[in-house]
Image: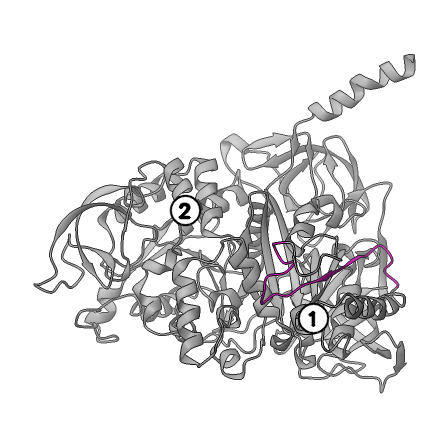
Amino acid sequence: MSTLISEIPMVENLEDKITLKGNALESEAIYIMREVAAQFEKPVLLFSGGKDSITLVRLAQKAFYPAKIPFPLMHIDTGHNFPETIEFRDKLVEELGVELIVRQVQDSIDQGKVIEETGKYASRNSLQTTTLLDAIEEFKFDACIGGARRDEEKARAKERIFSVRDDFGQWDEKNQRPELFDMLNGKIEMGQNVRVFPISNWTELDVWSYIQQEQIEIPSIYFAHRRKTFLRDGLIWSAEDGVVFRAEDELVEERTVRFRTVGDMSCTAAVESEANTIEKVVSEIRVSKISERGARIDDKRSEAAMEKRKQQGYF
Amino acid sequence: MKVLKIATAGSVDDGKSTLIGRLLYDTQSLTEDKLEAIKKSSEQRGYDYLDFSLATDGLVAEREQGITIDVAHIYFSTPNTSYIIADTPGHVEYTRNMVTGASTSQAAIILIDARKGVVEQTYRHFFINNLLRVKDVIVAVNKMDLVGYSEEIFEDIKSNFEALNSNSTYKEQNVHYIPVSALQGDNVVENSKAMPWYEGDTILGHLEQLKQDDVRDEGAFRFPVQSVIRPKQDEFHDFRGYTGKIYGAELNVGDEVTVLPSMTKSKIKEIYFFDETFEQARPGTSVTITLENDINISRGDMLVKSEELPKIEKDITATVCWMDAKQLVPGTKYIVQHNTNQILSKVGQIKGLIATDFSGRSDSENKLALNEIGEVEIKLSKPIFYDSFEDNKSNGAFILIDAHSNTTAGVGFIN
């Protein structure tokens, strides 16, 4: 009996030990961030001000703590961003003390490299590609970290974690490098670059739950607010800021809405929602019957819309 | 929340996409807009039923040919578990993609068409799951509705498969047989009323019961160093941290470790995860550790517990699955990536081709072509610190990188 009693506290001590059990998705993303910093000379984190890229920034902070994030953030600004997103971006960058590079789609338009779309469905979303590829060349970035997730869209479901692009930024979807176990092969030739997706295996709900758990600050447009809007094709569009084309017969009404994704204003529709806290957003996503990209008009152009954009160098 | 990665293998004809579609549908994981898109595409193609492969075959070329070419990742969750399905192609010419999908999976579903029974493709799927030591395998005998839900046919297929399994050298693998109809939903998520003779679990029921420990890679503690963190800030003036992911077993503060290749010994001082410190960290966590002594460590080095040294050698023999159109021939140079370590190497003799039907090996012509598997001798320019794949999955595998094209040309499992 005496030996048994003397053993009990030891077991308890063992259980009392502060043990890091970890979250598999978080550890995977941190591992990937560190591989990028180690394998590439000039990486950059593509930052849109949306929840996925905000999550990436937190993961990068965790990966390199107590050192600072060892690469800059870059925002390809369509000029059609929600003002709340830009405000948020500038505040975050200041807090982190990292470098922010901004390149404007407007400049590409002014230089005559791309032509602005016109009409009802005009969007600057696909114009971003040219500005992005020019910026990659300008700064000689060899790795661009992005917040794309495989659950977003079926072509993205095929994407590797280290996805090689040629000097034209093209994705060769039929000839992707095999990725085995945890071994990531970042070897590339001059002129090529790699798109890196650390949160490939996260779902929309995973991202929201993480934001909740980590108490990460996000732009206010993700929460329910009153907004002047109009309806088209069953989707709710922002009638503020004059970015989205609105026909005269499309009536403006004030609704309580929030945004599930924050892309270019011209292709991001709102959803009606009363969720004004992160807890409410998470429970709303949990029971939602519509996918997050259901409110992205850029994917609805055709069944292969995303695959085609990716082949051309879209992020 | 538990995260479980599952590889599925089979061709469209076996009903693989229907099975995945059924899993998504019955767990209410398909959103209305995605379901609507599948309905629309199915109608456009003139199908009578919903073709879920249109949702998983994400590339134009795949939808055109009606086959899966590359791995797709599909996500769904139950209140307890997040599931990641690596949907892999079944055709022999895409073996490399099957290996890719299986490499990160802890469980596998192998589909068999009840009308056809065990076919060549089944051998290959099982062989690869065997080779990659996927711990839990579900053999789903599908299309039971088309054979009158016959117990006899199911038992027949089961005994054929068991005969195949008797050739396996991986005895710790758990194999379960489940009769299903993915189209009708029998035994996928809901128990089948049509097969009262079957008393086992449904596919989802089985997966739900799997505990993380059931499928974990066990082995000795291994810590391949990813990078060294030196913040050069006043507050952390002398901080020198080593980043990496923990494999095999947990790590404790105070553990005595040996650094490879220098063989220097030290003790774990702190285990950091972001700005917190822990006394213990479980395998699978990405941490930053500090040591009691200042020693010279860089990326590619490995920390192990001093009483559990791995093998340290320059000549290795491995089972290699070849993934490049350019054949593997003796005398050529490749970069071996083993964990975070990259080492120039030279290919030696290619001793035998391994048939993927468990029939054994045959003499090779001293080369490996795309999708072939064989025994290969490799001479490394520097020693690596490895375990056999059998003892430690993460530390027993490597990839071969073509030094000219930079592509990942093959994967090796060290004997």
Q: Which mark is residue A285?
A: 2
Q: Is B114 rendered above or below residue A75?
A: below
Looking at numbered disc 1 in the image, what kind of residue is underneath it? Answer: Gly
Front in this rendered view, residue B105 or A161? B105
Q: Where is residue B393 in the image (x, y as percent from the top left)?
A: 77, 56
Give the total number of marks visible in the rendering.
2
Q: Residue A26: image x %, image y %?
A: 55, 46
Question: Dot 1 falls on which chain?
Answer: B
Residue positioned most to the bottom: B365
| A287 magenta-colored | no
Q: In which quarter of the image is residue A79?
A: bottom left
The residue that disc 1 covers is B148
| Mark number displayed over residue B337 | none
Front residue of this view, candidates B403 and A181: A181
For the residues labelled 2 and 1, say whether their Cβ atoms are less than 8 Å apart. no
Query: For residue B274, which quarter of the picture?
Result: top right
Looking at this view, is B99 or A69 the one in front? B99
Q: What secondary structure is the magenta-colored segment mainly?
A: loop
Quadrant location of the N terminus of chain A in the rendered image: top right
Q: What stretch is highlighted in magenta?
A: B169-190
- Badge 2 element: helix
Badge nearest the viewer, 2 or 1: 1
Q: Give the image location of residue A21, x and y in percent.
A: 64, 37
